[in-house]
Each structure stands twice: as C-alpha cells, then as structure tokens.
Image: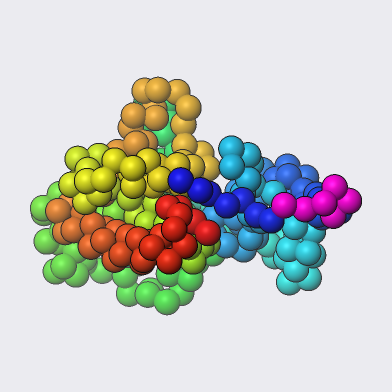
Amino acid sequence: MTMQTGPVLRDGVADAAADMLVGGVQAAGELGLSRSEFARAVQLGIVRPGPRPLGGAARYARAELDRVRSAGPPEALRERVETVAGAQAAAEVVGVGPSRFTRLARCGHVTPVGYRINRYRAVVWLYLTAELRGFAARDPGMLRGVAPPADRELMAAGADLRPRKWRGRHVGLLLRRTADPWERAAVLAWVLPEDELREAVPDPAERIVLAALAPPPPYGHPQVPAAAAVALRLLKAGPPDEIHWYRTSLDFALTGARDQSKSTGERGPT
C-alpha cells in the first residue's frame, strides 16, 4: 500500500515550503479566532488546510490565511462561525420557546453543526447562530401556530432527525475537502456500523486502507470513555434507509478507487 504525501523536496526548497505553512494554533491567532472558532471555520470549509502529513496535524498555508483575511474583518468571520449550545440558547436566537425549538430541530427544520456531551452524558447540540437567524427570517410561519401534519406525525413516532441531519452535513463537508476516490470512500466507510462495513467491503486489505484514511473525530468529540461511547453513536448511520444510502455511495466511490488502483498499480490515494 502506498500513500503519497507529496513530492520530495531539496533541503532549501523544503525549508522554504515549511516557512509558508503554520500550525492550527498560530493560524487561529493570525485570523483573530479562538481555537474553537478556528476549528469551526475549518470544518465549514471557510479555512482550507494544506496537505495533512501522515500522522501529523494539519498545517495552513500563509496564502490561505491571506485569502481569508482579505474576505473581511475578524468580526465578520467570527459571526460566520458563532454557535449556540442547546435548545434554550437556540430558541432565544430564533425567538420561540425551547419546546417549540426542540420540535423544529427534531423534525429536521434546522441542522446542528456540532455536539457536546455534558456531564450527565446527554447530547448538547450546537447550531450556527447565522443559520438560526436565517431560518427565522426565511420561515416565520414555522415559529408560531400549530405544527404542520408532517411534524405531528414525526413527533408521534418519537422521531429525532438531529443525529442523521448532523451526519449528513458533516459527511458532506468532509467529501468537499477531497477529490481522491480512496479518501472519499474512507469518509463514507467511516459512517457505517462495523458489521455493515464488513459486508460492504469484504476485502480486509481494503478495509485497512479505508481505516488509515478515515477522518479524525470532529472537534469537540469527548476523550472521556463514558462520554465518548455516547458520542460514538452519533457518528454511525442508524436507520436502514440511511445505511443503504451510505452503502450505495460507498460502492460507487470504491468503484472509482479500484479503477484508480488498476491504472496506477497502487492501492491508496495518489
């Protein structure tokens, strides 16, 4: 298995290239963002990382930081990545009560951008403030009156679309970061439960490649084992139709990845 990490550079050229890249902490500081704000900007594709070295943290080109700075002042960037945590705070932004906001979120009208696991091992969903304001301005009718029939049916069935909507959003953001078919397949494999992945990819060697290319857990994923176990359930597809969609997408991505390997004679990204 070959995983190419970039061309081999002469010492002087390599040093010059290294000088043009900075780590995440320094990049956040130069953009006037906190660590969490910077992580959100990267997640949303506002700040694009450079090639990630195997086993190393992402680094950021100075040209990319200059591009982001040229788009507007730090205050405008912070507004784009500002989040609120939980139904109470989100409801205040939208201008409704927490119970109504919870219904809107559970029925899929707003999509979380992240999560936290609190000390009670409960999921606290995070929402982009700008998106909440946009939703309130775009669909004011959803903020008052009785729930529409579709919402009433979902609530009667005990549905909660927040995990699924978040997974779809996160996977979409990850897929937009790369055009390499093996890396795209790894993103899709990452969201499948283990038994489904084994059925979809019976070749152990291919599963090793996909595991090596799997994206890291999202920013804010807990390290404490009990909380991590709760969060892990959010990372994996659940409903049968959702699992089917990811398996079908993975099959398509793997077809392209295998074709690439046939043409290059190597398994893994080129």
Decide: is 122 above or below 211: above
Give the farthest residue toward the top. 225
Q: Is residue 100 magenta?
A: no
Where is residue 117 drawn, in percent x and y?
41, 34
Q: Nearer the viewer, residue 179 or 192?
A: 179
Query: Which residue shows up at 25% across the image and 39% down it?
Result: 194
Horizontal placement of 29 versus 121: left or right?
right
Q: Is residue 12 magenta?
A: yes
Query: Which residue shows up at 60% across the image and 55% down it?
Result: 42
Horizontal placement of 11 versus 228: left or right?
right
Region rendered in magenta: 8-13
Where is residue 191 drawn, in percent x and y?
32, 48
Query: Which residue shows up at 14% across the image and 69% down it?
Result: 149
Q: In the rendered image, is residue 153 in sight? A: yes
Give the farthest residue toward the front. 265
Give the farthest residue toward the right. 12
Q: Nearer the viewer, residue 262 or 135?
A: 262
Q: In the rendered image, is residue 129 in sight? A: no
Where is residue 246 drawn, in percent x and y?
26, 58
Where is residue 175 drawn, in percent x and y?
45, 62
Query: Which residue shows up at 57% across the image and 62% down it?
Result: 45
Horizontal placement of 234 versus 216: left or right?
left
Q: Quadrant of residue 65?
A: bottom right
Horizontal placement of 15 versus 4: left or right?
right
Q: Nearer the viewer, residue 202 or 65?
A: 202
